[in-house]
């Protein structure tokens, strides 16, 4: 955890988290395998939030560095000794 920003009522408003490559790949793989009903079952609006996180990781990160996006990142992790 890098930073927690609080709102006027001293409640968490935003959280800045640092993830390793493997942690980010795991999160993207996990979210990519969930359906919208599962995500909404966790919390109202979960599908929207999960999709935004997945799109950020897959489109903004892994697709830039791996030909097969998130699946390419996972394959690279599995290929390591």
Image (cartoon, rainbow, N blue to C red):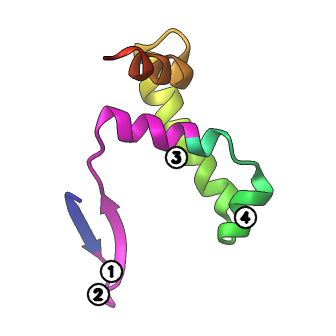
What's the residue at 52%, 27% (across, down)? 59
Is residue 51 placed above or below 22 in the rendered structure? Answer: below
Residue 79 place in picture, x, y as percent: 41, 14
What's the residue at 69%, 59% (across, down)? 39
> Which residue does the numbered mark 1 point to in the structure image?
7
Residue 3 place in picture, x, y as percent: 21, 63
Cβ atoms at labels 4 and 2 below 8 Å apart? no
- Quarter of the image holding residue 42? bottom right
Highlighted range, magenta: 6-29
Rounded to the nearest angstrom, the CA distance separating label 4 from label 2 is 27 Å
Is residue 26 placed above or below 40 in the rendered structure? Answer: above
Circle on res. 40: 4
What's the residue at 80%, 58% (across, down)? 37
- Quarter of the image holding residue 48? bottom right
> Which residue does the numbered mark 3 point to in the structure image?
53
Cβ atoms at labels 1 and 2 below 8 Å apart? yes
């Amino acid at each position: 955890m890098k930073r927690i920003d609080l709102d006027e009522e001293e409640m968490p408003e935003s959280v800045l988290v640092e993830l390793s490559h493997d942690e980010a790949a795991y999160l993207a793989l996990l979210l990519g395998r969930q359906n919208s009903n599962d995500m909404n079952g966790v919390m109202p609006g979960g599908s929207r939030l999960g999709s935004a996180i997945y799109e950020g990781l897959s489109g903004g990160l892994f697709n830039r560095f791996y030909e097969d996006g998130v699946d390419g990142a996972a394959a690279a992790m599995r290929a390591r000794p």
